[in-house]
Image (tube, helix red, strand yellow):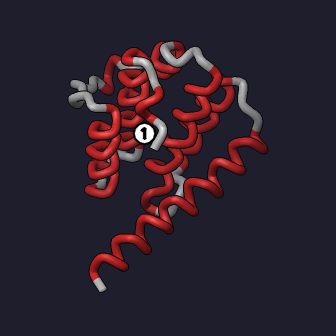
Amino acid sequence: MFLNRLTNEEKIGFLELAHYIAESCNNFSQTQNDIIEKYLLEMQIGDIEFDKENFDIYDTLGKIKNKKSQKIVLMEILLLIYSDHFLHEEERKVLEKVREEFGLSYYLETIYVEWAKTVLSAYVQGYALIEI
């Protein structure tokens, strides 16, 4: 939705984070794959070779310095996290690191979570409307 506003370095950082989250529960679902594909289209870039073994969340988050970009990353990553309508423990840990590293409040995260759930619901409704 807002990923086209990120710089190229921020886009790469975002994709690294998205892949890490998608693989964090050892359950890279088709839904998560589809969302990452939509991210790639929106950002107009190709996918990355993600190396989970050498991934450092703090190096990745360090690529996203702009405060508005940090908020965009949090908002968009919540869409991926809640795509299965459940916050897994590993995802919760990653989310906490993101929020803390970006210096964002728990209350802002709560608002973003509700926004993400609303957006995901609208997508489901939209797809259903197409099929009617």
**Could you tell me which residue is drawn at 53 percent across and 46 percent down?**
78
Q: Does residue 16 lie above or below 39 as drawn?
A: above
Residue 90 visible to an observer of this rendering? no
Quadrant where the N terminus is found in the figure: top left
Closer to the camera in the image, 72 or 105: 72
Closer to the camera in the image, 64 or 132: 132
**Could you tell me which residue is drawn at 49 percent across and 42 percent down?**
76
Q: Amino acid at mark 1?
A: Ile
Q: Is residue 30 shown left or right of residue 20?
A: left
Q: Mark 1 falls on what kind of element? A: helix
**Could you tell me which residue is drawn at 40 percent across and 15 percent down?**
9
Instruction: Tell me residue 32's x, y (percent).
Output: 34, 51
Instruction: Tell me residue 5's x, y (percent).
Output: 47, 28
Count of marks overlaid on the render:
1
Q: Does residue 92 lie above or below 7 as drawn?
A: below
**Could you tell me which residue is drawn at 27 percent across and 48 percent down?**
33
Residue 108 visible to an observer of this rendering? yes
Circle 1 is placed at which residue position? 21
Instruction: Tell me residue 39's x, y (percent).
Output: 34, 40
Characterize the local packing of mark 1: few (<14), some (14-19) or many (20 or more) Cα atoms within 10 angstroms. Answer: many
Q: Does residue 118 lie above or below 43 as drawn?
A: below
Instruction: Tell me residue 132's x, y (percent).
Output: 30, 86
Asked which quadrant contains residue 98, the reply is top right
Q: Does residue 40 lie above or below 28 as drawn?
A: above
Q: Is residue 112 shown left or right of residue 1?
A: right
Q: Residue furthest bottom?
A: 132
